[in-house]
Each structure stands twice: as C-alpha cells, then as structure tokens.
Amino acid sequence: MIEAAILRSASDRLAAAASACRSNYERCRTDVDFSEWMYRTVLTSLGAFILVAACSAAYLLAVQGAGLSALALAPASGLAAAFFVYYARSYSVKSRKDYRGALIDASLVHVVGFMLTMAESNVPLNKMFSNISNLGSVYGEDIAIEAAYIISLVEEDGMDVVSALRAAQSASPSVAWQELLIGIAEVYGSGGSLKEYLKGKYQALTDRKRLDVKRYNDSIQGLSSIYLSIVGIASMFISLINLVFNMAGWLSGDTLVWLDAVVIVPLGSLIVVYIMKASDPEA
C-alpha cells in the first residue's frame, strides 16, 4: 500500500536522524532492528494522534458545543499525544540501556574473578568469553549477552580477538565493562601479562565493592533508625488524635489507629524496603 510505504520511508528517515536513540537501542541487544522499532513507534504515535484527536473533537462538539474554529484544538491535542508516545518509547529505551549497564556493573567483580581463575590456568581469551556467555544463570544474562556478542564478532564476522573487544566495548551499556575490555585489548595486543592485569582489576573492583557495601550498610542503619523513630512518633500522635476525636464526639472507636496499623505502617514499610533494595550494591 502507498500509505504503508510512506510511513516506512518516514520512519527510515527518522531512524537515520535519531542517532542518540539508535545508540541507546543497540546497547539494549534486542532482536528487533532499530528501523523496525522506529516504524512501530511511528505507527503507535500515529494511532495515538488519531485516537486523541478524534476523542477531543467528539468532546468539543458533543459536550462543549464548540464551533469549527475551536475544533483546531483537536489535532493539536492529537499532536501532543503523538509526541508524548514517541518520547515515552525513546525514554524507555534509554532506561533499559541504563538498567542493563547497572546489572553488568553489579556482577562485574565476580566475572573478573572468574576470568582471573581461568587466566591462571592459561585458558585462551576467546574461550574465557565463551565460558562467560554460557553462565548467564550465575553472573547474569546481560553480561552473558555481552560476552556472546564478542564471540559472535570473532566467529561470525571474522574479527580477531582484539578487534572484537574494541568493537564490543564501543557498543556496551556499562562503562566499567568498557574499561575492562579496553584494558584487556591493550594488554593482550601488546603482549603483556593478562593475569597480572586481571589481578589488579579484580583487586580494584573488590575494594570498590567493599566500599559500596560499607556505605550501603551505614545508610541502611541510618534509614532504619529514622524509620523506626518516625513510625513510633507517628503511632503515638495518631493514637492521641484518635483519643481527642473520641472525647469530642467526632469519632467513635479506634478508626485512626486501625488506619495507621493497616495502611500507613505497611505502606511506609514497603517504601523503605523498595529504597533498600534499589540501593543494594549486590542487587
């Protein structure tokens, strides 16, 4: 159809112009090509435009009784909805890329320790990444995918190991993983000692992880103290308010106390647990 060809051409032009979004999308390592993702985004944005514009026009005519001049607001609202859908999908791509990078950073110290063990046994470099790619259940699927990408560059694209490492680091969502690959490529390419490099890298990552865990434990202790104090003070305050309302005849029973026990305290606990889990360096 002509309409589909026009939309496909427009999406291809948009995909070529959206270099930042393409870069983030490629770091997500999805099976769908970026041009196809952009085409689906254009279709979704167009659907949002038609739906919102039609609903706005119907509302203005049926409810507000607006004239034809006021109907110009309908396409404007549809255009706003289309832009919102486009930027929402673009932001979701960036968020996914950042999340993958955080997951890789969290497990990197363990992966480097495993690589150091293999280096001490003189395991070839490409075999190291092959082993990591098969251990997604141990070190995380995201870092296994990055290792599999390196192997694919060597086996399918015919690159040497150093070139594959350089290409893979430029498309990685994790800065720490990029630094590791650059260091390995420099050491391996110059004939240096990979074992000594990995030993120093493992020590540096271990020290950083130990510091992160210490900071996390200190913040959790402070957060726990503040939370327990707030819960205790809030419970006493709510009990006092409940008593005053009962004496004034504005309330009967322990309604506010039950509200605190059933709603406020559990909700506050869930929020605190979420914050603790989100900031956990081992997550």
Image (cartoon, rainbow, N blue to C red):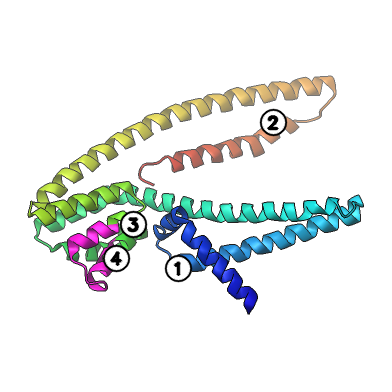
Q: Is residue 267 visible?
A: yes
- Position in image of residue 185 (x %, y %): 18, 55
> Which element is circle 4 on?
helix
Q: Are marks 1 and 2 in contact (CB under 8 Å)?
A: no
The residue where tag 4 is placed is 148
Q: Mark 1: give few (<14), some (14-19) or many (20+) Cα within 10 Å.
A: few
**Earlier-in-chain disc, 3 versus 1:** 1
Q: Secondary structure at mark 3?
A: loop
The answer for how far apart the CA atoms under marks 1 and 2 are is 56 Å
The amino acid at mark 4 is Ala
Q: Residue at x 68, y 51 (%)?
A: 80
Q: Which residues are magenta?
A: 147-168
Crowd tier of the residue under label 3, counting other residues whose Cα lies within 10 Å: few below 14, some 14–19, many 20 or above? some
Q: Earlier in the sequence, mark 4 or mark 1?
A: 1
Q: What is the three-letter code of the residue carrying label 1?
A: Asp
> Is residue 5 or residue 201 the one in the foreground?
5
User: Tag 1's secondary structure?
Assistant: loop
Instruction: Name the image quarter holding the N terminus.
Output: bottom right
Between disc 1 and disc 2, the foreground one is: 1
Query: Gap in Å between the C-alphas at discs 3 and 2?
Result: 55 Å
Q: Earlier in the sequence, mark 3 or mark 2?
A: 3
Q: Which residue is mark 1?
A: 33
Front position among marks 4 and 1: 1
Of residue 120 and residue 272, the one placed in the foreground of this image is 120
Residue at (73% x, 22% y) in the render:
241
The residue identified by callout 3 is: 171
Mark 2 lies on residue: 257
Question: Is the residue under label 2 in contact with that under label 3 (CB below 8 Å)?
Answer: no
